[in-house]
Image (cartoon, rainbow, N blue to C red):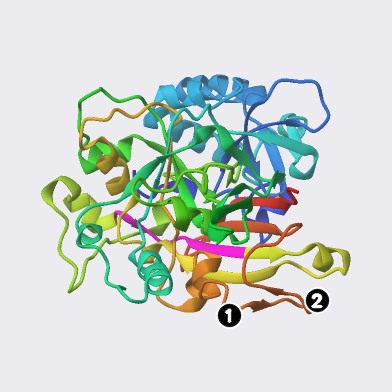
């Protein structure tokens, strides 16, 4: 994929909210989601975001021809799987068709207006049935800062981190879209009372701000994908919060890694931003000393030229008291995927390098996205130095970790000179008390 007419910065839509400079969903974005009208007893289907509206794509399929019509027809299904099956050429044809019928000179305004639903009046589902979920540690800044806080006596990074993407298999059944609440997890907290580990609600609830990668096709068992083949397997990206109970995590992580500390909830935005929409925000993937070049199976000319992405990832916190007092959510941090050590294609390729096949609908998390500065921290453990440097809230409250009643929102967006800003929607959820 390369830049084409759908990326034109001067394109405008007859949906006026899509022309607002502040919108996440201008006509240059066209993210996809599974939706239905809130409260309506009707099937979920695939829609595209345009300004503050979502368009029922299958309902306007007769406005398209050829591959675009076939792709639009597949959008009548309650998941994106049928659309994923059709492949990149159909996805691109659909994007072009949507762009053309939604422009300000469209001849189909009346027909399309009948198929729009305000986003505030819609409910959303997951894009696909997620059978597998893997989570990486693609940011050396995150690993380094957490290690220095948690293990000050031995702060050096393990040598495998600079040579190999590191991940673990995760729990897919607790992935939920934006807007839900969940009970604070319980577990063994890593401290003792009367000679026994204390079991109870986590006292160190944390978030991890990430991107999620949706896999579009099932690959062959035993086949390792090259970087370029891995790129072709990606349907699109979402924003993701991999909730983490730090006290449970540090107690259970050896010898096999996190388990209960991460299995209880993962929040995703319902919106999927396609790889074609992200073309203007591609960047070179360059390693500098003292870090080595990747091994051959994780290297390619295309990845070096344009494998990295320029995506801003922001974390906001809203307390119950703050919401009741009319305060806006507080921005805690702002990081960028340019600081990831590994690219999304490297993560996907590495998943297959031992012969593991991918399955359509699989979700792969990048891991916490952090930069070198404290204000670029992708989790609260980094931001508050393990809870020692609490964050001041406008209500007078302070936070070292996430408290009951707090709503945590992770959002992401792309901006670059000469192009329209696009966004990924919110991945927000609320921690509920678990007595």
Q: Give the camera-side residue of 236 and 347.
A: 347
Q: For residue 244, which numbered disc appears in the image?
A: none
**Whether residue 421 can be seen here:** no
Q: Residue 38's image quarter?
A: top right
- Which element type, helix, strand or loop, lies under badge 2? loop
Q: Is residue 167 magenta?
A: no
- Which quadrant is home to the N terminus? top left
Q: Nearer the viewer, mark 2 or mark 1?
A: 1
Question: Could you tell whether 341 is left or right of 75 in the image?
Answer: left
Residue 160 x, y percent position in the rendering: 21, 57
Please report the residue visible at 75 percent of the width from the left and 37 percent of the height from the top. 122
Please report the residue visible at 25 percent of the width from the left and 43 percent of the height from the top. 350
Residue on which disc 1 sits: 389
- Which element type, helix, strand or loop, lies under badge 1? loop
Of pointers 2 and 1, the one earlier in the residue sequence? 1
Q: CA distance from mark 2 to mark 1?
A: 17 Å
Residue 101 x, y percent position in the rendering: 61, 36
Assess whether mark 1 and mark 2 are in contact (beta carbons under 8 angstroms): no
Q: Give the camera-side residue of 345 and 29.
A: 345
Residue 260 x, y percent position in the rendering: 52, 44
**Whether residue 308 can be seen here:** yes
Q: Residue furthest right?
A: 325
Q: For residue 395, which numbered disc appears in the image?
A: 2
Please report the residue visible at 46 percent of the width from the left and 69 percent of the height from the top. 417
Q: Main secondary structure of the magenta part?
A: strand
Residue 244 x, y percent position in the rendering: 54, 53
Q: Residue furthest front?
A: 194
Extent of the magenta region: 307-315
Q: Residue 61's image quarter?
A: top right
Q: Can you say whether 1 is above or below 58 in the image?
A: below
Question: Could you tell whether 291 is left or right of 51 in the image?
Answer: left
């Amino acid at each position: 994929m390369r830049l084409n007419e759908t990326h034109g910065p001067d394109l405008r839509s007859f949906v006026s909210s899509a022309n607002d400079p502040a919108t996440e969903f201008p006509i240059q974005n066209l993210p996809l989601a599974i939706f239905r009208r809130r409260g309506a007893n009707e099937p979920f289907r695939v829609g595209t975001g345009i300004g503050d509206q979502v368009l029922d794509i299958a309902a306007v399929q007769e406005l398209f021809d050829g591959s675009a019509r076939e792709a639009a027809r597949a959008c009548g299904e309650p998941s994106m799987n049928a659309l994923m099956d059709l492949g990149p050429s159909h996805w691109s044809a659909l994007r072009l068709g949507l762009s053309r019928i939604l422009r300000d000179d469209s001849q189909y305004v009346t027909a399309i207006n009948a198929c729009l639903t305000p986003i505030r009046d819609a409910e959303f589902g997951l894009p696909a049935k997620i059978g597998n979920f893997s989570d990486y540690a693609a940011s050396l800044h995150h690993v380094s800062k957490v290690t220095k806080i948690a293990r000050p006596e031995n702060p050096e990074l393990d040598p495998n981190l600079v040579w190999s993407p590191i991940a673990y298999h995760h729990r897919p059944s607790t992935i939920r879209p934006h807007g839900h609440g969940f009970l604070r997890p319980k577990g063994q907290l890593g401290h003792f009372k009367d000679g026994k580990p204390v079991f109870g609600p986590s006292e160190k609830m944390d978030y991890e701000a990430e991107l999620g990668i949706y896999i579009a096709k099932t690959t062959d068992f035993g086949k390792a994908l090259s970087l370029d083949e891995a790129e072709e397997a990606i349907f699109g990206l979402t924003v993701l919060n991999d909730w983490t109970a730090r006290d449970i995590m540090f107690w259970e992580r050896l010898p096999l890694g996190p388990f209960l500390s991460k299995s209880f909830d993962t929040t995703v935005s319902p919106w999927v931003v396609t790889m074609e929409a992200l073309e203007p925000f591609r960047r070179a993937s360059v390693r500098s000393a003292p870090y080595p070049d990747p091994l051959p199976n994780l290297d390619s000319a295309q990845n070096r030229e344009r494998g990295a992405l320029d995506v801003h990832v922001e974390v906001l916190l809203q307390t119950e008291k703050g919401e009741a007092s009319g305060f806006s959510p507080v921005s805690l941090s702002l990081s960028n995927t340019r600081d990831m050590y590994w690219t999304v294609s490297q993560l996907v390729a590495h998943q297959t390098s031992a012969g593991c096949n991918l399955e359509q609908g699989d979700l792969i998390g990048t891991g916490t996205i952090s930069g070198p500065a404290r204000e670029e921290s992708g989790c609260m453990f980094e931001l508050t130095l393990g809870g020692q440097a609490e964050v001041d809230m406008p209500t007078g409250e302070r936070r070292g970790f996430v408290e009951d009643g707090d709503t945590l929102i992770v959002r992401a967006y792309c901006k670059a000179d000469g192009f329209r800003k696009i966004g990924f929607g919110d991945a927000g959820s609320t921690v509920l008390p678990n007595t």
